[in-house]
Image: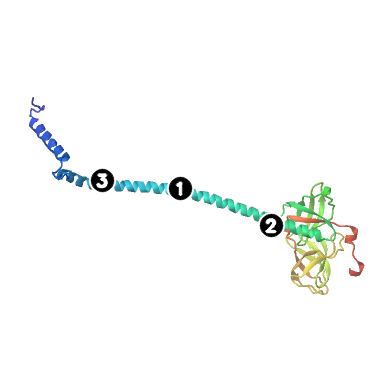
Amino acid sequence: MSVVEPGGKNRTPLVLVILLVAQLLSMSWYGRTKDGRPNLLLSWVLTAVYPVQKAGGGVGSVVSGLWNGYIDLRGAKEENTKLREQNDQLKQDLFKLKEELAASKRVTATLELQQTLPYRSVAAQVIARSGNEFFNKIIIDKGRLAGIKLHQAVITPAGVVGRVIGLGPVAAQVQLLTDSYAGVGAQLSESRAYGEVKGVGKAFCEMRNVSGLEPVKEGEAIITTGLDGIYPKGLLIGYVQEVGLGSGAKSHRIVVKPAAQLDALQQVLVLELSEQDLKIDETVK
């Protein structure tokens, strides 16, 4: 039966031709030559599609490479993050060890001083400071229950700190040398000239009442005289920082740098002195 399109044309011969060509192509595709090699048509087809397959394989390799690179990069980033965290932790641990070592050294130095002093003392920790710029008062963690009394001298291995001016059961307030109301009987270590070290509310002190005729050197040590009834004789107060020369009628103006680091105090000794400890031999005054 013939196939007739609505336009009235018979397409049966065309259909038969297409079917015949398809059959021939199929037979050529699956057929082989006498020596068993693939036929020529198959070779042509394979040759034609090779560039497409090659390009497709290349794209696949690129995509695969990019994905693997992404996975590797992400893994490296995570590893770097972990390494940074470990490094930060190591830095914190090292800082902590350094702080513990420094604290241990301070305690050791204080205990060694305590053992060598010819009088009794109480070791204490600084737990608070006054709120002003120059830290002219501190609070220590020992008070009346530890035997602390008013006006007792406070020192460090480096030198004089100040004296106790406030007292509670478990804490005490210490006035530093730099406080504007503080004063210490003092003596120049080389000229042996006497005077008084006074606080001026700043980081330094002043040594007053030293005759303008006395020789004074920058860097010269200043020690306690024991004449003030608070500090025993021979403790280091500080060093001459600057000298404003006086005259026969005018005293020197001497700026004193405290020997103890008053702005970084952590461990101190409170001296428990008896009247005998403060007694001065009249022959050496």
> Marks 2 and 1: which is nearer the front?
1
Marking on residue 53: 3
User: Mark 2 or 1 closer to N-term?
Assistant: 1
- Compared with residue 282, is residue 24 higher up or lower down, i.e. above or below? above
Q: Give the quadrant of residue 183.
A: bottom right
Residue at the disc numbered 2: 102
Number of residues whose C-alpha sits closer than 10 Å to that of mark 2, classed few (under 14), some (14–19) or many (20 or more): few
Q: Give the quadrant of residue 215.
A: bottom right
Residue 5 pos. (x, y %): 10, 28
Residue 100 pos. (x, y %): 68, 54
Q: Secondary structure at mark 3?
A: helix
- Whether residues under marks 3 and 2 lie with C-beta atoms below 8 angstroms apart, the answer is no
- Between marks 3 and 2, how big is the CA–CA gap? 72 Å
Residue at the disc numbered 1: 75
**What is the image's colouring?**
rainbow
- Is residue 180 visible in the rendered structure shown here? no
Q: Secondary structure at mark 1?
A: helix
